[in-house]
Image (spheres, rainbow, N blue to C red):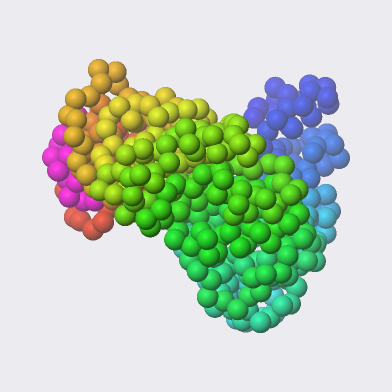
């Protein structure tokens, strides 16, 4: 920012400009420039919400964010700490920020890209020596809530499954309240018992819970599973893996939420010798018990094994079942014929509000999915070029694509029109046949202008790139900054020119 060109602007225009910029950038660039700027910044700038997020850059061997944090912590925070009500903070900034000063008005905290070892009692200057690990995750709440004593909103945004919190090994008999003020919690956990723990009275005012679970299995804990959850008004559940415990775990939990007003559900249910989940089953399982429910967003995937052809519901059967229970804005993609006694079905509410679409199979026919940034595809039938063309057109903001499919593509014919994923950053094909590497990395088939992260087996990578000499796959690799393979390997001389951004 060129201060000489803006110094004569009226205060109203300066404030308009400042409020359009990142708050941290304004602090770092303009505090100390002159008295007028400082008065505008500290007296009039909207600084109740601080997004403290940095990308690691280095200047003379020292990270750039350290220079910024030095100024923020020493010269800025002591002057605004009583005004800050919301904090979004990354792991790089966490240690410096939380130790800098108290924030008496803080009510909302978002921890972005956290790791378990960065949220320790030592980090928060608590006088307790025990280190926080995955196995004693309840201490994380105590540590974070020590920093924000009056928090009402707390959100954890993970970077990997290693960041999932685990509560099951903790003493579940301990009914101590961890917070009496927290009413909105968003979190990633390892298993279903962790979810039950969070709902077992440890947060007395909790009315909104958004939870992402690694896997749902039958509960092994002695936590009360019958007590009504009368304070819970909003609940969101997303599970990353297919579950066989829909009837034994999920249904009984939902029946306890008698005052629930909003429900979001994205799960995959494996069913043996049964049929797809439809509207009638959802109604009988739990919807009829949720009499105050006025918003239900869902994407429910049914995975049938050992299925009986005559029992399989058609797309029209499923659609009519939802219409008859009052849900008209839905769509379905279902296998109406089983392959090797196996079938897939996704039924989802419209408009589609989730940021991810999980367990897509070959029965997908298209739709509008502008909110989706992460797509997980899995099937035993190969995905063909035609389907990827549909996806590129319907998932316009897709950033992460994960493919699990070990079957080779049947059709070798490619469309004359180049498939382009304009926003794709991450491609994970480590559990996919090599045909999908050819599909996505060959420049005359697919164009990935912003691909930065590739996860793939080394054998596939070496084969399709001809040991980093194939020009047809070179263009889609030039911007890759992160490459993960199943085995380590010695990089040949040609590797660096093939992946110049790594």
Residue depicted at 77% across the width and 27% down the height: 16
Residue 451 place in picture, x, y as percent: 37, 36
Identify which residue, 119 or 59, lies in the foreground.
119
Q: In the displayed structure, would residue 120 be above or below residue 76?
A: below
Q: Could you tell me residue 187's position as x and y percent?
A: 60, 58
Q: Residue at x 55, y 55 (%)?
A: 212
Q: Is residue 135 visible?
A: no
Q: Give residue 217's position: percent from left, percent from top.
A: 48, 66
Seen from the viewer's position, the closer of residues 83 and 363 is: 363
Please say if 310 is above or below 395: below
Q: Is residue 315 left or right of residue 44?
A: left
Residue 30 sits inside the magenta stretch: no
Which stretch is magenta? 456-472
Q: Is residue 123 above or below residue 242?
A: below
Question: Magenta span has 468?
Answer: yes
Q: Quadrant of the N terminus?
A: top right
Lateral position of residue 432 relative to residue 185, left or right: left
The residue drawn where x is 33% and y is 30% is 387
Percent position (x, y) of residue 257? 70, 58
Q: Quadrant of residue 494?
A: top left
In screen coordinates, is 468 left or right of 499?
left
């Amino acid at each position: 920012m060129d201060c000489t060109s803006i110094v004569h602007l009226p205060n109203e225009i300066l404030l308009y400009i400042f409020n359009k910029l990142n708050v941290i950038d304004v602090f770092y660039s303009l505090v100390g420039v002159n008295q007028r700027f400082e008065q505008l910044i500290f007296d009039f700038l909207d600084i109740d919400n601080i997004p403290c997020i940095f990308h690691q850059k280095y200047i003379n061997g020292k990270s750039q964010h350290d220079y910024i944090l030095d100024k923020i912590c020493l010269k800025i925070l002591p002057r605004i700490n009583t005004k800050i009500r919301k904090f979004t903070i990354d792991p790089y900034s966490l240690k410096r920020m939380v130790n800098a000063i108290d924030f008496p008005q803080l009510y909302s905290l978002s921890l972005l890209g956290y790791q378990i070892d960065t949220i320790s009692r030592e980090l928060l200057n608590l006088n307790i020596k025990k280190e926080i690990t995955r196995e004693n995750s309840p201490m994380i709440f105590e540590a974070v809530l020590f920093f924000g004593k009056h928090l009402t909103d707390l959100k954890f945004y993970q970077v990997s499954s290693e960041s999932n919190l685990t509560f099951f090994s903790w003493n579940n008999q301990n009914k101590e309240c961890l917070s009496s003020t927290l009413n909105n919690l968003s979190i990633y956990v390892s298993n279903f018992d962790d979810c039950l723990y969070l709902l077992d009275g440890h947060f007395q005012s909790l009315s909104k819970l958004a939870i992402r679970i690694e896997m749902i299995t039958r509960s092994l804990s002695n936590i009360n599973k019958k007590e009504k959850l009368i304070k819970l008004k909003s609940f969101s559940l997303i599970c990353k893996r297919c579950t066989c415990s829909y009837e034994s775990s999920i249904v009984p939990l939902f029946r306890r939420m008698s005052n629930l007003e909003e429900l979001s559900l994205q799960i995959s249910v494996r069913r043996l010798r049964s049929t797809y989940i439809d509207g009638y089953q959802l109604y009988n399982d739990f919807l009829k018990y949720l009499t105050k429910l006025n918003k239900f967003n869902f994407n429910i995937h049914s995975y049938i094994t050992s299925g009986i052809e005559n029992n399989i519901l058609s797309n029209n059967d499923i659609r009519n079942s939802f219409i008859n229970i009052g849900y008209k804005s839905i769509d379905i993609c279902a296998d109406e014929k089983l392959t090797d006694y196996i079938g897939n079905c996704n039924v989802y509410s419209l408009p589609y509000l989730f940021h991810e679409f999980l367990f897509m199979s070959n029965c997908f026919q298209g739709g509008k999915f502008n909110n989706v940034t992460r797509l997980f595809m899995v099937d035993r039938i190969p995905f063909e070029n035609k389907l990827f063309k549909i996806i590129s057109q319907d998932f316009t903001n897709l950033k992460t694509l994960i493919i699990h499919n070990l079957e080779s593509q049947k059709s070798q014919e490619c469309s004359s029109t180049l498939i382009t994923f304009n926003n794709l950053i991450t491609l994970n094909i480590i559990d996919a046949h090599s045909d999908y590497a050819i599909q996505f990395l060959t420049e005359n088939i697919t164009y990935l202008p912003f691909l930065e992260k590739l996860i793939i087996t080394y054998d596939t990578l070496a084969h399709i790139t001809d040991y980093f000499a194939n020009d047809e796959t070179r263009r889609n690799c030039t911007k890759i900054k992160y490459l993960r393979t199943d085995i380590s390997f010695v990089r040949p001389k040609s590797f660096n020119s093939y992946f110049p951004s790594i």
